Image (cartoon, rainbow, N blue to C red):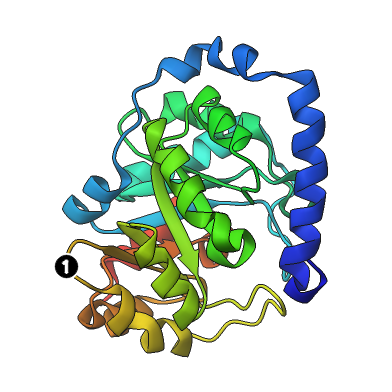
Amino acid sequence: MDDLGVLGKIAEKTAARVAREKQKHPVEWLRAQPLYDHPPLSLKKSLSSGRGIIAEVKFVSPSEGIFRSNASPVEAARIAAAYASAGASAVSILTEPEFFGGDYSFLAGARDSCPATPLLMKDFVVDNYQFEVARSIGADAVLLIAALLGPRLPEMHKAALSLGLSVLIEVHNEAEALAAIAAGGALIGVNSRDLKTLKVDLAVARRLAPLVCLPGITAVAESGLRSRSDLDSLSPLGYQGFLIGSSLMKRPDPGAALTEFLHAN
C-alpha cells in the first residue's frame, strides 16, 4: 500500500487493529451487544429530506493536529446532539484511534443523544468484520473508500447493505467514481482532499460532479467546506449532501458554528 501514501499507512495500522479486535471480540459477541438491535436509519433519506449536512465529530486531524483535547464519549455525544439540534441531517463520528484520536465509544455514546439522526461510522474499512462492529455500536452508515478497496468494493458494498447499513462510497477521481457507480453506489462522496498528500482542492468536487450527480444517486461533497459560499457554489452542480468537520470542530462551540453556517447569507 506504499503507493497510497498516508491512506496506505492508515490502512496498514487499521488491518492490524482489526486483527486484534477479532481475537478479542468475535462476531457472536458483537451481535449480542444491545446497540446491535438498533434499526439502522437511512442516510440517503435523511440527506434528501433535510438540509443535507453531515456534521463531523473528530478531535484530531493528521493534517491539522489536535482540535480539542477533551475527547471522550460524553463530549462526542454532546457535540453530536448539538449538531442534530442545529439542523444536521446526519452526524459523522471518527472511530479510527491512531491517526484521528477516535474511539468506538464516541459513536456508541452519541446514539442515545441522537436517536433520530443517522450516525456515520467514519473509519478506514478493510474487513467485513467492521460492519458488524458498526452495528454493535449503533451506527447507521459506514464509509467505504474506493481507493483503499479497489476490486473488493462491490462485494464489501453488498456485505454492508446486507446488514442494513447505509453505505457512503468515497471517491477522489474519475476512475473511482465510475467504480462506485458500477458497484451500485446510491450514496457517493467526492473527497476533495488528496489522501496521499492531504492537500484539499474543491476543484475535484466540481470536476467530478457530472459523473456522480445523477438521478438515483445522492452525491456528497467532502472536505474543504469552510463557508456557506462553498455550499452555494456546489449545490447547483447537483450535490445534495455536504460533509463538514474541521471548520466546525475548530470553533469553541461546534453546534453554534453549524447554526451560523446554515443561516449565513
Foreground of the two, 1 or 244:
1
Between 231 and 207, the residue placed more toward the observer is 207
Residue plotted at (26% across, 66% down): 240
Mark 1 is surrounded, within 10 Å at the Cα level, by few (under 14), some (14 to 19) or many (20 or more) other residues, namely: few
Q: Mark 1 = which residue?
A: 215
Task: Report the label total.
Answer: 1
Q: Name the residue rendered at 27%, 50% in the picture.
A: 44
Quadrant that contains the C terminus = bottom left
Where residue 122 appears, x then y in whole percent? Answer: 56, 49
Q: Is residue 158 visible?
A: yes
Residue 260 placement: quadrant: bottom left
Q: Is residue 45 left or right of residue 170?
A: left
Relative to 258, say whether 83 is above or below. above
Q: Secondary structure at mark 1?
A: loop
Q: Using residue 212 as the reference point, say whether residue 149 is left or right of it.
A: right
Quadrant for residue 70, please give it: top right
> In this picture, is 12 found above or below 23?
below
Q: Is residue 72 left or right of residue 191?
A: right
Residue at the spot x=54%, y=23% of the render?
Answer: 136
**Is residue 252 among what the camera can see?**
no
User: Where the N terminus falls, by quadrant?
Assistant: bottom right
**x, y percent for residue 257:** 44, 60
Amino acid carrying label 1: it is: Pro
Residue 98 drawn at (x, y percent): 80, 49
Residue 35: x %, y % from top left: 48, 18
Residue 20, compared with residue 235, is above or below; it is above
- Residue at (28, 84) in percent of width and height: 210
Q: Which residue is at the front of the view, 120 or 1? A: 1
